[in-house]
């Protein structure tokens, strides 16, 4: 199976949420989420992807980190080649979802505030696994994964 083949799959026993954030904080966000979800984060890959000035849409703009015990659970960072705002998508077990959601929100508040991004209410961060046009589906299409 290819690296991105199963991203479009839906699972009743998992939850998924996403948020946009300033790209300069990718490492910190990934490390904090990785600790919660027991996912190893390759910070060198994040740096390499972020600072690749020739990057285009496609696999080279995506950092994907999977849980080694359940590869359906992951942290995906879209390092948009044309923007300083990136998207993070997290898919996790139901038991981890509230902690992931509140952590994402607090990280957004912390880093977004520093960069002057609009305030987001935590209710805006919701399970989007079964939404027809969630951020993950948009990323898959945009990057032709």
Image (cartoon, grey):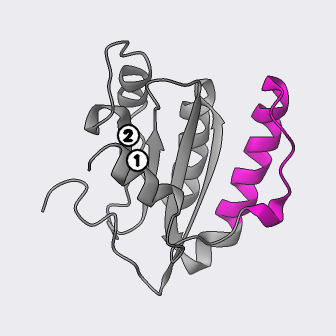
Give the CA separation, mark 1 to mark 2. 12 Å
Say which of 128 and 103 sits in front.
128
Disc nearest the viewer among 1 and 2: 2
Decide if residue 84 is on the left or right side of residue 73: right
Asked whether the viewer can see residue 65, the reply is: no
**Above or below 87: residue 122:** below
Which residue sits at x=38%, y=60%?
67
- The image shows residue 47 at horizontal and vertical percentages of 43, 22
**Above or below 34: residue 46:** above
Which residue sits at x=36%, y=16%?
52
Which residue sits at x=51%, y=68%?
92
Residue named by callout 2: 63
Say which of 107 and 132 sits in front.
132
The tag earlier along the polypeptide, 1 or 2, is: 1
- The image shows residue 65 at horizontal and vertical percentages of 38, 49
**Above or below 29: residue 17:** below
Question: Can residue 89 be found in the magenta stretch?
Answer: no
Of all residues, the one furthest to the left in this rendering is: 1
Say which of 134 and 24 sits in front.
134
Q: What element does badge 2 sit on?
A: strand
**Are the residues flagged by discs 1 and 2 in contact, CB closer than 8 Å?**
no
Give the label on residue 40, or none: 1
The magenta stretch is 99-124
User: Quarter holding the N terminus?
Assistant: bottom left
Classify residue 41 by image quadrant.
Answer: top left
- The image shows residue 106 at horizontal and vertical percentages of 79, 48
Of all residues, the one furthest to the bottom in this rendering is: 12
Mark 1 neighbour class, 10 Å CA radius: few under 14, some 14 to 19, many 20 or more: some
């Amino acid at each position: 199976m290819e690296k991105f083949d199963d991203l479009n799959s839906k699972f009743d026993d998992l939850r998924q949420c996403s948020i946009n954030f300033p790209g300069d904080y990718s490492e910190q966000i990934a490390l904090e989420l990785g600790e919660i979800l027991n996912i190893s984060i390759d910070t060198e890959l994040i740096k390499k992807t972020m600072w690749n000035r020739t990057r285009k849409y496609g696999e080279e703009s995506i950092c994907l980190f999977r849980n080694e015990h359940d590869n359906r659970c992951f942290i995906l960072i879209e390092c948009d080649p044309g923007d300083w705002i990136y998207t993070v998508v997290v898919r996790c077990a139901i038991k981890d979802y509230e902690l992931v959601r509140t952590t994402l929100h607090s990280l957004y508040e912390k880093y977004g505030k520093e960069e002057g991004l609009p305030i987001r209410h935590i209710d805006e961060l919701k399970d989007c696994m079964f939404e027809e046009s969630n951020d993950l589906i948009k990323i898959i299409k945009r990057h032709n994964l």
